[in-house]
Amino acid sequence: MSGHSKWATIKRKKAATDAKRSKVFSKIVKEINIAIKEGGPDEDANSRLRTAILNGKGVNMPKEIVNRAISKASEKDSANYQETTYEGYAAGGIAIFVECTTDNINRTVSNVRATFGKQGGNMGVNGSIDYLFERKGVFAVKQGELSEDDFTMEVIDAGAEDVELDEGVFTVTTALEDYGKMQKQLETLNLEVESAEVERIAGELIEVDAESAQKVLNLIDVLEEDDDVNNVFHNMDLSDELMESLS
């Protein structure tokens, strides 16, 4: 799972930069909107809303923005967002899975298709690569005072399948069905959770040369700049040697 963990670390660092912060805030506002439409504004009774608020705290989203998003989403005439996904291939045959939240499907599909084309990729039909990925719970947790061994012992009974420590942050991966159990365990441990997401993790990673890898990362970067795009997943093997050659 180290390839995924490396990608999770890259995404976390990108989200922490000022250039990406407004995009991350926008994503969380949309998530709050959908969570409230589905389960109401009561945080205690709505686990999806609770997770969205937690993710807001993890990226230092001001409390007034969170409260304003909750208030606005609770209004009858608030925007109606839809969740949609797109699939395709990038350079080197790398599979790309795109998750979006949008209030205009036509705009979103047009932008995503154009990005694939301009960046040397090909957009496919839904279902063409979905089988390559498995949905997992992924948590980024600040280390605090626990050692890696102690932390692993605390979370393994809650369904942790993989635990990796990088620069003071644990990345914990669980089966999708253990997502809620892990969330409760981390709350019990009173640790600072930077993010809690359901992600698509590739079952098998593909090695590519540095030139192809750069093209794949360029495609991902442009997709992630689109306001409608929430997450981009891939099955490229980000080995240490490859990352060194790209730096």
Image (tube, rainbow, N blue to C red):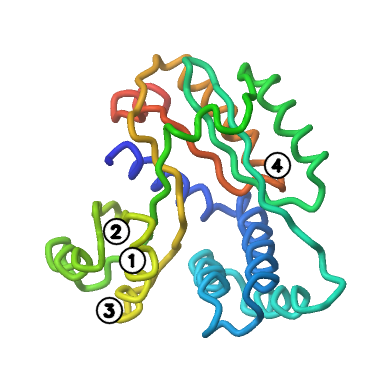
C-alpha span from label 2 to label 1: 6 Å
In x, y percent, where is residue 192?
37, 73
C-alpha span from label 2 to label 3: 14 Å
The amino acid pointed to by label 1 is Lys
Q: Residue at x 42, y 17 (%)?
A: 210
Q: Which residue is mark 1?
A: 142
Q: Which residue is mark 3?
A: 189
Task: Please tell me whether residue 130 is drawn above or below residue 50 in the rendered image.
Answer: above
Task: Please tell me whether residue 38 is drawn above or below residue 202 in the rendered image.
Answer: below
Q: Which residue is mark 4?
A: 226
Mark 1 or mark 4, earlier in chain? 1
Marks 2, 3: nearer the viewer: 3
The amino acid pointed to by label 4 is Asp
The amino acid pointed to by label 2 is Phe
Q: Quadrant of the C terminus?
A: top left
Instruction: Confirm or deny contact between disc 2 and disc 3 (CB under 8 A).
Output: no
The amino acid pointed to by label 3 is Leu
Asked whether residue 171 is in view, the answer is no
Marks 1, 4: nearer the viewer: 4
Q: Quadrant of the N terminus?
A: top left
Instruction: Confirm or deny contact between disc 1 and disc 3 (CB under 8 A).
Output: no
Asked whether residue 41 is in view, the answer is yes
Residue at far right of view: 77
Instruction: Confirm or deny contact between disc 2 and disc 4 (CB under 8 A).
Output: no
Disc 1: CA contacts within 10 A as few (<14), some (14-19) or many (>=20): many
Q: Which residue is mark 2?
A: 170
Q: Is residue 14 left or right of residue 139?
A: right
Task: Please tell me whether residue 117 is drawn above or below residue 110 in the rendered image.
Answer: above
Mark 2 or mark 1, earlier in chain? 1
Marks 1, 3: nearer the viewer: 3
In x, y percent, where is residue 27?
64, 57
